[in-house]
Amino acid sequence: MLNHKFSAYMSEWLYGENGYYATYKNIGKEGDFYTSVSTSKFFGGTIAKHIISLVDEGFLAENGVVCEIGAHHGYFLADVCEFIYTLRPKLLESLKFVIIERFDTLQEFQKNYFQESFGDALKLTHYKSLSEFKCENAFFIANEIFDAFPCELFYKGKTARVDEHAIEFDVDDDWVSQKAKKYHKDRGEIALGYEEFAKEMSMACGKFEFMSFDYGEMQARPDFSLRVYEKHNVIPFFDEKIKREELFAKSDITYDVTFAHVKDAYEEAGVKFIELKTQMLALIDMGILELLEMLKGHVEDKIYKQELEKVKMLILPNFLGERFKMIKFRKK
């Protein structure tokens, strides 16, 4: 890792041959961090309820595509399918289910998990990238994807390079400087790849809704948010005690999303921005509490209370409910 720009360093950390996301990783209690997917099946269940509402309003055809991008285990899409089967079983037969996943090892894990879960009742199709995929009508979903795009580090007019895991701010990069100026940053992370990603999605499908959940704010943070997650410990990237060579490719590295950048990328690609709201409001608006009420009438009180506690983690402000945001786009 001698004299690389930071984006190349982060790409190698996460997606290189031996990168963090190149192989199966536990998420949740046994892993390095929790996600909404690992917290409760009702996260996927609420998305299933929303997909059914899209079919009912005529936006998504009954034979349309439901596509998850960056599925890792495949648990999220499997939860969506499970709840579709419960709420509107005929849609499980007519909808097409797709995962965009670049890594062969993770594709194999996902295929096996779906086979174990659904047998031949559901057909799952994989693509390595959005550029390989084409359809007329789709619902795209992603969880914590924009925080995993490689970024450049910017500080007072200079872009970072990495010299044997040490960070030096001495590179002139006009594109990074322009983005920093646009989003009023004198320091922080500038994500790479949002524009290309938005264009690929727009070109892949004629009519779609895209919904993504991630942590961040519409406006850029006034400082660096880059951090490493290891065994549920949060380690600031610029902590003087950090040993980056020991954490490299063995732990997750992430940063807060500037949603204004995501919004601009999609609007430039001809896709309409619909809304940004907290995960709490998004899940409540899409009917997570109604799903809980349905459960209450069919299970023992003990099981209901267990699921209720998990849902609280998804929606309460002091857990995931406020820090995480839902951003939604539509192309007609």
Image (tube, grey):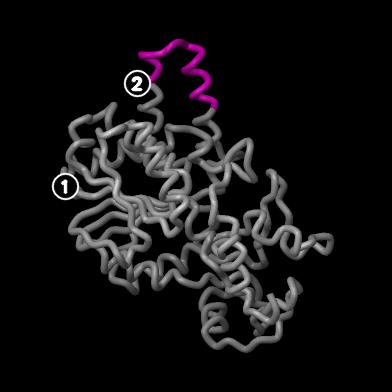
Point out the stretch of residues depicted in magenta: 295-309
Magenta residues: mostly which secondary structure? helix
* x and y, in percent, of residue 120 in the image: 26, 34
Dividing the picture into quadrants, the one containing residue 164 is bottom right
Q: Quadrant of the N terminus?
A: bottom right
Q: What is the three-letter code of the residue carrying label 1? A: Ala
Query: N-terminal of the two: label 2 or label 1?
Result: 1
* x and y, in percent, of residue 171 in the image: 65, 86
Tell me the CA gap for discs 2 and 1: 26 Å
Tell me the residue that label 2 is attached to: 294
Tell me the residue that label 1 is attached to: 61
* x and y, in percent, of residue 184 in the image: 57, 75
Against 161, residue 67 (above or below) is: above
Give me the residue at 44% from left, 42% from top.
281
Depth check, front residue: 28 or 147: 28
Q: Which mark is residue 10?
A: none
Q: Is residue 206 magenta?
A: no
* x and y, in percent, of residue 124 in the image: 30, 45
Q: Is residue 304 magenta?
A: yes
Against 310, residue 150 (above or below) is: below
Mark 1, secondary structure of its residue: loop
Mark whose residue sits in front, 2 or 1: 1
Q: Is residue 92 left or right of residue 152?
A: left
